[in-house]
Image (cartoon, rainbow, N blue to C red):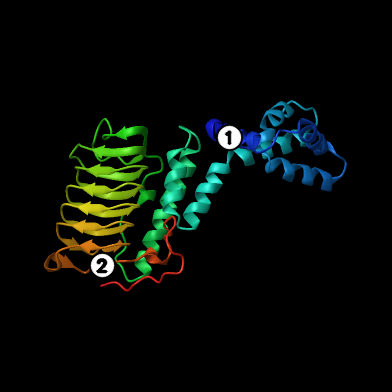
C-alpha cells in the first residue's frame, strides 16, 4: 500500500534540502545485486534513509535480479511505512499533540487498520496506567470490534445510521449532533462537540472537547479545555487546559494541567488532579516543562 501524499512530501523536502544525485542513487541500486553481502546490506540501508530515491526504486522493481527486486521492494515498504513509525514513536513517548498532528495529515485509505490499532493501544496504555494508579478500569473495550465504521472529513456530524455501531473518525472538527449512543474512537485536530449519549470510546483532540449528555466508559485526552455538561461514570479525562464538570462524577479520574471545576458533593470514588503537567507520569504535552513533578491527586 502506497502512502502517496506522505511519501511525495518526504521526497519534496529532500529535494529542497539538497539536489538529488542520480548517479549515487543508481550506483546504490546497482549494488543491491553485488556479490558481496556487506555491500548489498550497506546499499539497502542507505536507500532506506533516502526517500528521494523512490522514482528510481519504482523503476528498479523491473530488474531481473530477484534478490535485488526483493531488496528494492523491502526498501519501498520501509519508506512507505514512515508515517506508521512516526505515529508509533509519538504514542510510545506519550506525545499526544504530535500523534494527533500525524493523524490529521494521514492519507485517506492508507494503513487505516494499523493506525487505528496504534491509537487503540495508546488509549489502552493510558487505561493501564490509570488502573495501576488505583483507578477503576475504563471498560471501553476497543478490541470488541475488529474493523469499525471509518469516516474521514473536515467536519464529522455523526454516521448515517447512529445505531451505536463502533466508529473510527479522523476529522478537523467533530460535531456529533445525533442523540443515539456513541461507541468508538474519535480523533480531531480541532474541536469536539458531542450531543449524544457516550457509552464507550476514546476521544483524542487538539482542540477543546465538550460533551452534552451522560458519558460512561470514556477516555478523553485534549490539548485544550474539556467540559462535561452532564454526569460521567467510569471515565478518564486528561486535558492540558481547564476541565469543567457540571454533573456528577463517579469512578473516574480527572487530570488537568490547569484547574478542575467540579461539585464535591456529587463526586464519588474519583481522583482529581490539578496543575499536573505530566498526566499519569506518561503524557508529554508539546513545549511543556520536562522536569516538573506531577502533584498528588485530591
The N terminus is located in which quarter? top right
Residue holding disc 1? 7
Query: Secondary structure beneath disc 1?
Result: helix
Residue that sits furthest to the left in the current view: 265
> Residue at left 22%, top 52%?
227
Q: Quadrant of the C terminus?
A: bottom left
Residue labelled with disc 2 = 272
Residue 168 image position (x, y, % from top left): 36, 40
- Compared to residue 251, the image places residue 181 above or below, namely above
Residue sitting at the far right: 35
Neighbour tally class for label 2: few under 14, some 14-19, many 20 plus, Cα within 10 Å: some
Q: In the drawing, what numbered circle is on residue 199? A: none
Residue 247: x %, y % from top left: 14, 57
Q: Residues within 10 Å of mark 1 (few under 14, many from 20)?
A: many
Task: Pick whichever, 297 or 288, lies toward us.
Answer: 288
Residue 1 seen in the figure = no
* 170 horizontally vs 115: left or right: left
Which of marks 1 and 2 precedes in the sequence?
Answer: 1
Horizontal side, residue 30 vs residue 140: left or right: right
Residue 268: quadrant of the picture: bottom left
Query: Looking at the image, how many numbered discs can be counted on the residues?
Result: 2
Residue at 50% across, 38% down: 111
Q: Position of residue 74 (x, y in %)?
A: 68, 39
User: Which image quarter: residue 255?
Assistant: bottom left
Q: Are marks 2 and 1 in contact (CB under 8 Å)?
A: no
Q: Is residue 69 left or right of residue 252?
A: right
Rendered position, 124 above or below 19: below
In depth, the one of 87 and 168 nearer the eye is 87
Secondary structure category for the residue under label 2? strand
Report whether residue 83 is seen.
yes
Give the x, y percent position of residue 218: 28, 53
CA–CA distance between discs 2 and 1?
Answer: 43 Å
Amino acid at each position: 500500500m502506497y502512502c502517496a501524499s506522505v511519501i511525495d512530501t518526504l521526497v519534496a523536502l529532500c529535494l529542497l534540502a539538497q539536489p538529488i544525485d542520480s548517479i549515487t542513487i543508481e550506483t546504490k541500486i546497482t549494488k543491491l545485486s553485488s556479490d558481496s553481502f556487506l555491500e548489498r546490506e550497506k546499499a539497502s540501508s542507505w536507500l532506506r534513509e533516502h526517500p528521494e530515491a523512490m522514482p528510481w526504486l519504482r523503476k528498479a522493481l523491473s530488474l531481473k535480479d530477484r534478490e535485488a527486486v526483493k531488496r528494492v521492494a523491502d526498501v519501498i515498504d520501509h519508506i512507505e511505512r514512515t508515517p506508521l513509525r512516526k505515529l508509533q514513536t509519538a504514542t510510545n513517548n506519550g506525545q499526544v499533540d504530535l500523534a494527533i498532528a500525524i493523524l490529521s495529515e494521514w492519507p485517506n485509505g492508507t494503513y487505516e487498520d494499523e493506525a487505528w490499532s496504534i491509537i487503540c493501544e495508546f488509549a489502552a496504555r493510558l487505561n493501564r496506567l490509570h488502573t495501576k494508579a488505583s483507578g477503576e478500569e475504563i471498560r471501553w473495550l476497543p478490541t470488541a470490534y475488529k474493523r469499525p465504521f471509518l469516516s474521514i472529513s473536515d467536519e464529522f456530524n455523526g454516521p448515517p445510521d447512529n445505531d451505536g455501531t463502533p466508529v473510527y473518525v479522523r476529522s478537523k472538527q467533530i460535531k456529533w449532533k445525533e442523540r443515539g449512543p456513541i461507541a468508538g474512537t474519535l480523533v480531531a485536530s480541532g474541536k469536539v462537540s458531542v450531543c449524544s449519549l457516550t457509552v464507550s470510546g476514546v476521544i483524542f483532540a487538539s482542540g477543546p472537547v465538550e460533551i452534552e449528555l451522560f458519558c460512561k466508559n470514556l477516555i478523553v485526552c485534549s490539548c485544550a479545555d474539556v467540559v462535561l455538561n452532564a454526569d460521567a461514570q467510569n471515565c478518564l479525562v486528561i486535558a492540558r487546559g481547564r476541565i469543567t464538570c457540571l454533573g456528577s462524577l463517579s469512578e473516574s479520574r480527572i487530570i488537568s494541567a490547569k484547574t478542575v471545576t467540579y461539585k464535591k458533593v456529587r463526586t464519588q470514588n474519583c481522583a482529581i488532579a490539578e496543575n499536573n503537567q505530566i498526566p499519569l507520569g506518561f503524557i508529554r504535552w508539546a513545549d511543556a516543562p520536562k522536569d516538573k513533578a506531577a502533584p498528588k491527586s485530591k
